Image: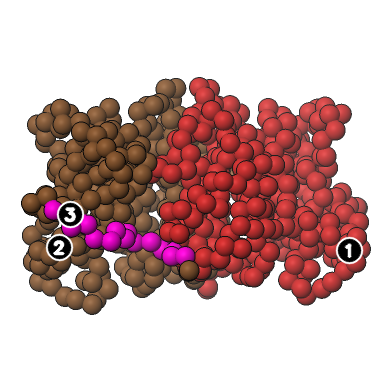
Chain colours: A red, B brown
Amino acid sequence: MGEFELIRHYFAAAPCAQGGEAVALGIGDDCALLAVPPGEQLAVSTDTLVAGVHFPDPCDPFLLGQRSLAVAVSDLAAMGANPLAFTLALTLPTVAADWLQAYARGLSQMAQACGVALVGGDTTRGPLSLTLTVFGRVPSGQALTRNGAQPGDLLCVGGELGNAAGALPLVLGERSAEPDVAEPLLAHYWSPRPQIDLGLALRGKASAAMDISDGLLADCGHISLASGVALTVERDRLPLSMPLVTLLGQSGAEHAALSGGDDYVLLFTLPPVRLSRLLVEGWPIHVVGSVTAGQGVTLVDSLGRDITPQIRGYQHFRETP
Amino acid sequence: MGEFELIRHYFAAAPCAQGGEAVALGIGDDCALLAVPPGEQLAVSTDTLVAGVHFPDPCDPFLLGQRSLAVAVSDLAAMGANPLAFTLALTLPTVAADWLQAYARGLSQMAQACGVALVGGDTTRGPLSLTLTVFGRVPSGQALTRNGAQPGDLLCVGGELGNAAGALPLVLGERSAEPDVAEPLLAHYWSPRPQIDLGLALRGKASAAMDISDGLLADCGHISLASGVALTVERDRLPLSMPLVTLLGQSGAEHAALSGGDDYVLLFTLPPVRLSRLLVEGWPIHVVGSVTAGQGVTLVDSLGRDITPQIRGYQHFRETP
């Protein structure tokens, strides 16, 4: 089987979502064709995962299939976009049917959960890496961006923090834990659930939004910079899971929640008057701080004292001096 | 400088095309936002280039910048789409300012020539590879696909064939040649010009189209299969350049034209009545064969004798038996 049949064989047959009328032409030609209804815009995001950098190598290809798509779709959720489709650029050292089948199954399962259709891609030989480009639809002018936070807004997150960072030593085999601790943390790492519905609910309500991929404090830094405001995070408001606290202790769990990456829950700001409605509707929203005039990100303890650590999210490159 | 500033610093400031109103939101948020006017569709294509597989490593980063974008935009030309924007996922082993600056310059120059704006991307650490996803606009229902070739159509190409394949031994330093031979061939390899205008001119005229990336015969196979027709290629009609024939001889040049990859000229079929108009308009179209009922691809000599070689385009993977 040649390169040309690879994607078709393992992926096109996989039961991804079909995309409906919005996918005018799928896999198999020089381009896919997407139809965007009048009054809507297309949201686009690209993410690369490299073996040994973004995931352990070797790892379970089924889980990698889930994770690689979830991470990408999370950016659509962060914009308040309706997921529509994606392309997959897959670079593999060798063709291994077992690996491809398992990867395609994991990818496919997440694609169905997120409602995205695979519309194209490329397969190449080389060190294992995956680049996914995801597409979503959003009514013109209603996308959630990072630059609208206002003094007086509340700072909120869409779920527990730090679980994926807590899972990392388990993923890497550096630690072990009882199943009731390990399993929920590992599930969060390998198959994060992009908060698509929450993103949709926040349209017209949140003043700024993004997904947490680099850690709460680092990502707060992005909103602070883009919006030109100061953000205060209250340590005692961090939503921590029981498994995380059991594994790392209170202090370790707080550290994971503040600086660990890979959470893929939404981080957003909104006026207090809009919060109650969302809470009544049952959204899993946690207020973790507030927005004020100024700049930068401050972490405070229960007495309001500044306990800001040196903020450092996960970055793949650091410039040498 | 962190990962987050990398793309912004080297690429966002580079004078790529700006995208105009169609790019509602560019680099810097979770997603870019593209506006597609009513009555148009968005054409999408993804291409990955891996060091040592798709280009020599090391190589001139300026030339790589040109080539990596041109190869991707060629897929838009093949659909008859108007190039609009692209994302870049760049995986690098280390951050080298010189390399990034030169790469960005080459990319930027090709982006201006093709009229595409950089709207997003990702930078990661790992073995050097590049994944570009390109976006174009096409009136709904007018995209050029591979599946409409009809018996009676002519089989045409948009320019000389084999030049990039001829350049490969020069690129790899396996051969040398006089400047008047080497330079045009190397230019074709490193900065192919996507036939955007020809693709637009073929809308409503060509019955099938694609760009030649795997070699003429292999790519004819794709049209044959998608359209359910037989294609005949006449060896003596192959458009060969003087530098190519000088370097490889007549027979070697024909082989490069038939089986070499990386041409990135358009391959298309159209009814004879539509050809004359295009030729009068001055398009560089060469008739290389014809479409008949049946299936498969046949190569014939000047006497019409079947001289079909085993067709084998460049494929990155071959399945082990």
Q: The disc labelled 2 sits on which kind of residue?
A: Ala
Q: Residue at x 68, y 47 (%)?
A: A109
Tally the numbered discs: 3
Residue B273 position, x and y percent, is 15, 27
Secondary structure, magenta segment, majority class: loop
Helix, strand or loop at disc 3? loop
Please check the rendered image and state whether residue B307 is part of the magenta-colored stretch, yes or no: yes
Q: Residues within 10 Å of mark 1 (few under 14, many from 20)?
A: few
Q: Residue at x 10, y 71 (%)?
A: B178
The residue pinned by badge 3 equals B306
- Label drawn at residue B253: 2
Q: Is B198 displayed left or right of A86 in the figure?
A: left
Position of residue B102 relative to residue A67, above or below, is below
Q: Is B94 displayed left or right of B137 in the figure?
A: right
Residue B217 position, x and y percent, is 26, 53
Residue B110 position, x and y percent, is 30, 50
Name the N-terminal-most of marks 2 and 3. 2
- Label drawn at residue A179: 1
Q: The disc labelled 1 sits on which kind of residue?
A: Pro
Q: Quadrant of residue A136?
A: top right
**Residue under disc 3 on the same chain as residue under disc 1:** no
Residue A126 position, x and y percent, is 47, 68
Write down the region rendered in magenta.
B305-319
Name of the residue lying farthest toward the bottom = B174
Chain of the residue under the numbered disc 3 shown in the image? B
Position of residue B3 relative to residue A113, above or below, is below
Q: Pointers 3 and 1 in contact (CB under 8 A)?
A: no
